[in-house]
Image (tube, rainbow, N blue to C red):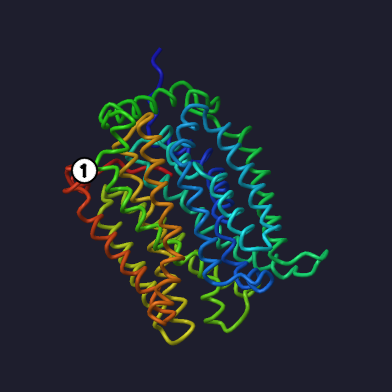
Amino acid sequence: MTTPHVSLERVTGKIARRLLPFLLLMYVIAFLDRANVSFAKAAFQADTGLSDAAFALGAGLFFIGYALLEVPSNLMLHRFGAKVWMCRIMVTWGFASTAMIFAHTETSFYILRFLLGVAEAGFFPGVILYLTYWFPDQTRAKAMAIFYFGAPLAFIVGSPLSGLLLELDGFANWHGWQWMFAVEGLLAVVVGIWAYYYLDDKPKDAAWLNPDELRTLSQALTAQTSASHATGLLNTLCKPTTLYLCAIYCLIQASVYGVVFYLPSQIAALMRSKVGLQVGIVSAIPWLCALIATYKVCAWADRHGQRRIPAALCLLTGGLGIAASASVGTPLLGLLALCAAASGFIAVQPLFWTYPTKILSGPAAAGGIGLINSIGALGGFIAPNLRQWAEVHFGSPAAGLYVLAGLTVLAAAMILALDRLVLNAPHPHRKRPAANSF
């Protein structure tokens, strides 16, 4: 008796429903814990006497610790499995984030931000690697787009939450920013422990996939692996393709965090209000736009097999938005500009990640993805410090935004040249993949 054929679309749809909501929850908490310092900025500086330059340095130091351990952390995930390593990452970063309640001086702020980066290192590239175990290339852009909802959702949900927690200032003799760091940090600890019991390391470990579904998925993943570039880890880390992708991602991340770390205070300035619940609610609007844009753009990209052109257009839209936000004269136009910036910078990222995950596999993928994200993380260090330098050097609060907008134009140009100059591959629009069901 022959077993009925199970379509790949049905299998990946089932996997998406099982894994993506939980991975999305993890990313929401991760992004919230790394970026909630943006909500604490005004109150934190007022209570501790931290200067703008010290805040920019401390905000960026997260990414130095993060970058240093990205590659070894991703190799550890490949070796020990996702459930153990994701649990370790989330629990340690949760405690590090909670410890921010003790950051009363510049030195303690610097140390704790650095340690938070060390603890979280490997989470994002680990999930990107983990998705390659479960989703073939033709459905991966949409899967990554859903995972990337974590960034805008962190602000859609986290902006009002952070604003509300800041308004607990004085309760139990704690500052509002202490309540914010404590509550949001402990959330990571709880979800990290849950991850150990919920995640399966590989499809073969998933009792919720039947043999026919597992066979269909394995055939698709095996065919994809045999077509990928099988190179050693060291060669992968040093090859021009990997380094070119590192440079692009660094520019993207510099643009992203140039917005993220200052968006609440920028919204507050537009509203002529302090950062609290009201500003938190309004700050969620650009990220709601980013969520919708990411889904629509990546669904279109998967449907048409096109990644390069929409990725470049997303960057140009984000760059135009960030530049316009510095020069518009009304709160409404300023908010619309920030909506364009957030949408472009978030939507481009899952499109970008389809390139390294397509050409790398096995340990080379673990190391290569880790290195790309590690170098990209340096963009998060560059962004606040470059913005602060430009504002001081040119004597204008708009100068930093114009410089960051220029970086996005360069990133867009590099993405447009990606297929011909680096991958030497045919343009994706010449091959239309099958539609997917999730």
**115 up-or-down from 323: above or below:** above
Provide the secondary structure element on which disc 1 rests: helix
> What residue does disc 1 label?
423
**383 up-or-down from 118: above or below:** below
Residue 38 picture quarter: bottom right
The crowd level at tag 1 (other Cα within 10 Å; few <14, some 14-19, many 20+) is some
Residue ID at (28%, 28%): 230
Residue ID at (52%, 54%): 62
Q: Position of residue 241 (x, y in %)?
A: 25, 43
Q: Position of residue 107 (x, y in %)?
A: 62, 59
Farthest residue to the right: give it.
172
Residue 341 picture quarter: bottom left
In the displayed structure image, the side of residue 112 where residue 150 appears, left or right: left
In the displayed structure image, the side of residue 347 where residue 311 appears, left or right: left
In the displayed structure image, the side of residue 183 where residue 353 appears, left or right: left
Q: Position of residue 113 (x, y in %)?
A: 58, 55
Farthest residue to the front: give it.
107
Question: What is the tally of numbered marks visible in this picture?
Answer: 1
Q: Given the image, on which type of amino acid does mark 1 rest?
A: Leu
Residue ID at (41%, 83%): 328
User: Which quadrant holds the C terminus?
Assistant: top left
The residue nearer to you, when weighing 215 against 180, is: 180
Farthest residue to the top: give it.
1
**379 up-or-down from 402: above or below:** above
The residue nearer to you, when weighing 310 against 188, is: 188
User: Which quadrant holds the N terminus?
Assistant: top left
Q: Position of residue 104 (x, y in %)?
A: 69, 63
